[in-house]
Amino acid sequence: MTNEKLSSSLEDYLEVIYNYIDKNEKVRAIDISRELSVSRASVTEALKKLADKKLINYGRYDMISMTEYGRTKAIEVIEKHNTLQYFFEEIMGLDSNEAAQTACKIEHIISENVFDRFTDLRNFHQNHPEYTEAFKKHYRDK
Amino acid sequence: MTNEKLSSSLEDYLEVIYNYIDKNEKVRAIDISRELSVSRASVTEALKKLADKKLINYGRYDMISMTEYGRTKAIEVIEKHNTLQYFFEEIMGLDSNEAAQTACKIEHIISENVFDRFTDLRNFHQNHPEYTEAFKKHYRDK
DNA sequence: ACAATTTGTTAGGTTACCCTTACAATTAAT
DNA sequence: ATTAATTGTAAGGGTAACCTAACAAATTGT
């Protein structure tokens, strides 16, 4: 009951919360609201759902903290994000902004399997920078 | 007013309709309903929206046909789909089913820019099969 | 300490999708 | 041609995400 798939939207909330806590900062609803460009009311709603699912601990006016389970889930999403960001930025050569935006959308919809392949691709390019270079040359000279 | 961005869902409907018409078959609501695994009622609703947006022509019990504009839009989506399918199947080496599923989700969320890069990547691999081979070897031997 | 500001929550709406049920229109079978 | 089956539509609901407005609680500045 604690392992249903999270919606894209809740994954985004979780990710933001994790990133704050990871920097040893406390997160307020308003921080999340700014980060995700949603209203404070929407944040309240999302926090309730995350707490329901045992991903975070929180209560009215309490500091938000994460459960172990929430941390695990957050890290999963963030790893997907990083791998995708690498792909779009370092391999595909998109500017880091567009790479991030694209990664943000795709991170929620790929399976473990597809994610593993992206990880392989990243390793491959890190071990063989000449391939990355060859492709970059290809689209530069298009 | 005729150029708002389509939702993922409406893009899916449009794609299915195009594919039927492209095969010179007439599309019925029930065909779409089966293809997309939604109720016939949902199809009616979607068809109304597509007609509102001038992507298809239809009326109660009429044969569904596409406008030129609809055709253009459908082709855009389908090209994204094909390019992504190539990427996931031929480059990433996923089975064609998982490649298709993944392409279906991603086709709705990538920008023109990102799509162009995937096209470049496809060209690159088609011109340099040795790169594809090298990567395949890499993940096979993992 | 207390007024002013900031932040969190509630209540009430909206929109996009999807559903089921029931009925209407069309098509097929005899 | 009439019944039976299939297909299309309307009505009424549900859910997830979002919003605004109003109010409550906490924090800050002096």
Image: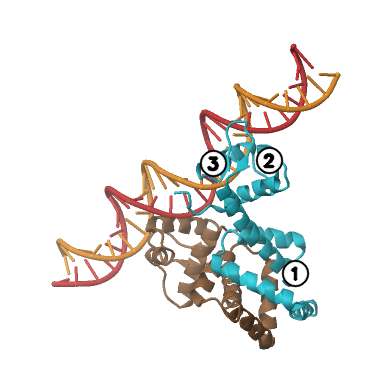
Chain colours: A cyan, B brown, C red, D orange
Image quarter of the C terminus of chain A: bottom right
Q: Are marks 2 and 1 in contact (CB under 8 Å)?
A: no
Residue at 54% over, 39% down: A48
| Cα–Cα span, label 2 and label 1 | 31 Å
Letter of the chain that mark 3 sits on in the rendering? A
Q: Residues within 10 Å of mark 1 (few under 14, many from 20)?
A: some
Mark 3, secondary structure of its residue: helix
- Left or right of A9 in this view: D4: left
Residue at mark 2: A27
Residue D17 higher or lower than B51, as above or below? above
Residue A15 higher or lower than A110, as above or below? above
- Left or right of A34 in this view: B97: left
| Cα–Cα span, label 3 and label 2 | 15 Å
Residue at mark 3: A51
Residue B117 higher or lower than A42, as above or below? below
Q: Position of residue B118 (x, y in %)?
A: 67, 73
Q: Are marks 3 and 2 on the same chain?
A: yes
Letter of the chain that mark 2 sits on in the rendering? A
Residue at mark 1: A90
- Left or right of C9 in this view: B40: left
Instruction: Choose the circle earlier in sequence order: 2 or 1.
Output: 2
Q: Position of residue B73 (x, y in %)?
A: 59, 67
